Image: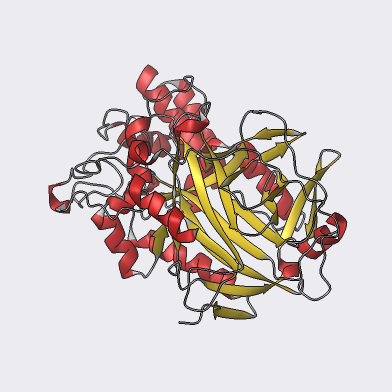
Amino acid sequence: MKILFASILLGTGLLGAGGACLSPDKCLPCSRPIGDPVDAQIREAFAKQGIRVSDGEVQRIRPDVLLALKEARVHGLGNSKVDFAAVQIAQDLGLDSGPGSSTVRNLCAAIGYLMRIPQAPPLAWSTYFNETVNLWNQTGFMGLMGRHQFHPVKISWEDIGRDANSAWGDRISDVGIWVRKDEADPASACLALSVRRDSNYRDKVLMVPAERIRIHTQERGRTVEKTLPQRLRELGLASEHRDRNVIVSNQFAIVPVPARNMTGAWKPGTPPRAAFNFSIFPYGSTNFVITDVIEGSSEAIVGPGTHQMLFANIDGRKAPFTASRAEDRPDLLRMERDLKAKGMDVDVQRYYLIQIPLRRDARSIRLSNLGTPPLGRGKDCFGPPLPCPTTLYKSSAKACVEESSGLGRVAIGHGEAEGAYFAGAGYRGTRAEEPIRVTVVYFVTPKARITEADMQTFAKAFAQWDAQAVWGGSFVVK
């Protein structure tokens, strides 16, 4: 079955090797920014006025910088609305803006510098979407991944039990991430790219104490954090011998997330977002699945047959998850700060997919069956690659002001309800005496040229999970 599904993907182009832009030097240089100034340009503009700002400070002042820039372009640099935004920027940076201070004048000069940076026409969402899901056909991007020994995949094999030197096993699941080009149309979804630090066959994993995995439930309008063993006991799915540690695999999902200045199918002034669903296909077994994001957790029972979609459970209604550029979701960033201040383990860009094995002989179990992904989308998503990427992997140019990193943070939320949510039934007391697998996914989106700094971000995040592990390696015997 595993080989059959791989053949289907090959036939549709989902696992094709491909090759685009074989001569990266002939690609468009990134000599002009697309739309709003990138963080590096903001830092440069402020530095020219003797004001040094950190990455975190840039994120904090960015909304007021863009507001000042917008007002300056419409009404002129001397408009009072620009000065008002400059005062707020000064406050956020802890700078003196009192009488006799030159701070506001210097900040307005920085806004004037940003106004003089040439702007390219807005990028079409469709073009950006196609480039992002097709990154693995770009030789420059794949070369960068290969040099750092990272492994981009479209389908990730999340195994609890696999035979030695084999694609087969008694508890294997395929996992994919389906991002919609049109939020209202589930059939428009394409598989996004996940970056692992090992190949699917090697399947390097960690054993992490189960207490380290925290689940978040919504109770009477507030977020309650529980350890995974606590939640298992509540669900009637605890194991006496298998819940001390869990199997952990961590990866990054590179997903297309629209920016405000892109042309697309959303209302002007509305923060754009991309809807997505995970799909999971357990081969020959049945698993109870918990998904956990900053807004809370959802549960479903999946079994063999085909890929099953996972949704957010919003008051008994199923809704796709959404990915937004973090700066477009100040509400979720505020929630993250507030929950962390209470000592909770949350991350606005983190998605837990937790597979709890259920007994094969359990007759009472009813599957969730929330829907299946558009498996026939191969040609639409991965047709002839673009001859050269226009934004995501360009040749360097001295005139280009590049971001120190090209992948931006993503905030995960949920979209509109699309029907009733059925979590499954008859699962209590059916836990199989096998380990639990936790897939940890961090969402990022391309905002500029993908760089070495992004590879360092990957490595740092992987190392943070290594530090929590009691063991790391591969259960697959070569």
Q: Quadrant of the C terminus?
A: bottom left
Q: Tell me, yes or no, if residue 155 can be seen here.
A: yes
Residue sitting nearer the eye, 356 or 30: 356
Where residue 275 appears, x then y in whole percent? Answer: 53, 36
Q: Nearer the viewer, residue 463 or 372?
A: 372
Residue at 47% across, 21% down: 80
- What colouring style does the render use? secondary structure
Q: Which of the two residues, 107 or 99, is positioned nearer the viewer here?
A: 107
Q: How many numbered discs?
A: 0
Asked if residue 240 lies left or right of residue 385, the reply is right
- Taking the image as drawn, is residue 468 in sight? no
Q: Position of residue 420 (x, y in %)?
A: 72, 31
Q: Residue furthest top?
A: 75
The quadrant in which residue 109 appears is: top left
Q: Residue at x 63, y 55 (%)?
A: 353
Q: Is residue 289 above or below residue 435?
A: above
Which residue is pictured at 82% across the width and 38% down the height? 221
Frontmost residue, 338 versus 124 = 124
Q: Where residue 464 appears, x then y in whole percent?
A: 57, 70
Left or right: residue 72 compared with residue 248: left
Residue 342 position in % (x across, y down): 77, 54
Side (left or right) of 327 relative to 285: left
Left or right for 354, reference 155: right
Q: What residue do we see at 34% from left, 48% from top? A: 11
